[in-house]
Amino acid sequence: MRRITFAQAINETFHQMMERDKSLFLIGQGVTSPWYVGTTTVGLYERFGDGRVIDTPVSENGITGAAVGAAIAGMRPVVMHPRMDFMYLAMDQIINHAGNWRYMFGDQVSVPLTVWGIINRGGEQAAQHSQAIHSMFAHAPGLKVVMPGTPYDAKGLLVSSIYDDDPVIFVDDRWLYSIEGDVPEEIYTVPIGKGVVRKEGDDITVAATSYMVHEASKAALSLKEQGIDAEVLDLRTIKPIDEGLLFDSVRKTGRLVIADGGWKTCGVAAEVSALVSENCFEYLKAPVVRVTLPDTPAPASSALEKKYYPGAGDIVRAVKNVVGRR
């Protein structure tokens, strides 16, 4: 098995899946531009042409509506939003239409749509170009939301999203694009709704999403040196959350820190905390703690960004606080 980057894993998936399935097409603003999508779509336009790799005008609502209609008609579109912030403009199409269609038509019509949203946090891009709004889609019925944190999962979850007969929000983070990992050359799937234990431990559970999985793993190494054995969970899917994996870990360790790169209020960390409080309360030895973005817009200053975005150090401090409480 060879090692490739997160971005290369996404690119390879599109090449292989578009070759296999002629009903699959990619549509979005700047879908052929490295400035928008990095190297994730390299070679697709040249290989498959403008009928299947469609670079569009700036119209998030219209682009997404076209993809929803194509999915209802039997195709398998992937609609790309190069900055997740502007998916707000497509909320009507994603939630009112794609998410509700199967229910409204009595299970007679499916919407096999993948909505690929890219988080562009950092780099002094400020409040309107740095937002991670994944939890807003997890709130809506009818949608599945996946957040791969490794190259292996990027490929496997993208394949699963494309194959799925219901709309899936596939969320990636450009901070992950250069991360390398082992990825098979053949097409494979990672099941939607299944998390994974990245590191086993007995003292505390750290449940994380996306890039925060890597920060949690760094934190776990530091904590190990200080005599604290942390178990690291990669949720991978935030709708539906792998409750069995989460509950089993918390029942074993009795403590929980949640690390998510979204806002704190009504976010993924809040949902995970509520699930554990409802189902594992008698096992908890200390209150659940959330490590998230603060409830403020992203700053434009690089100095403020260092304070704004949580990392391994924040997780270490949270874990030591939880373990120290009785």
Image (spheres, rainbow, N blue to C red):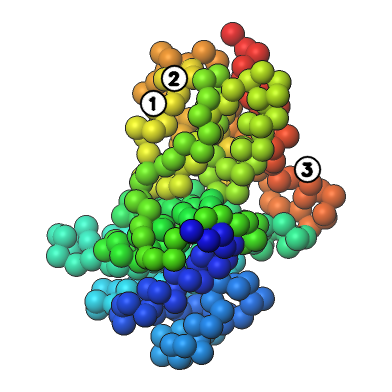
Does residue 237 sit above or below 71 in this rendering?
Answer: above
Give residue 177's position: percent from left, percent from top.
62, 61
Tag 3 residue: 307
Q: Quadrant of the C terminus?
A: top right
Q: Residue at x 56, y 72 (%)?
A: 40
Q: Is residue 245 left or right of residue 181?
A: left
Q: Residue at the location (51% across, 13% down)? A: 285
Question: Which residue carries the number 2 mark?
Answer: 252
Q: Answer with mark 2 or mark 3, whichever residue precedes in sequence.
A: 2
Q: Nearer the viewer, mark 1 or mark 3?
A: 1
- For the question of whether residue 86 can be seen, the reply is no
Q: How many marks?
A: 3
Q: CA distance from mark 2 to mark 1?
A: 6 Å
The answer to whether marks 2 and 3 mark residues whose Cβ atoms lie closer than 8 Å is no
Label 2 Cα crowd, 10 Å radius (few <14 / some 14-19 / many 20+): some
Residue tagged 1: 248
Badge 2 vs badge 1, beta-carbon distance below 8 Å:
yes
Q: Is residue 104 above or below residue 214?
A: below
Residue kind at label 2, given as amino acid type: Lys
Residue at the image point whose x is 51% and y is 71% from the top: 11
Residue 11 makes an appearance in the image: yes
* Circle 3 Cα neighbour tier, 10 Å, few/some/many (<14 / 14–19 / ≥20): few
Front residue of 103/154: it is: 154
Amino acid type for the residue under numbered disc 3: Lys
* Element class at badge 3: helix
What is the quadrant of residue 307 in the picture? top right
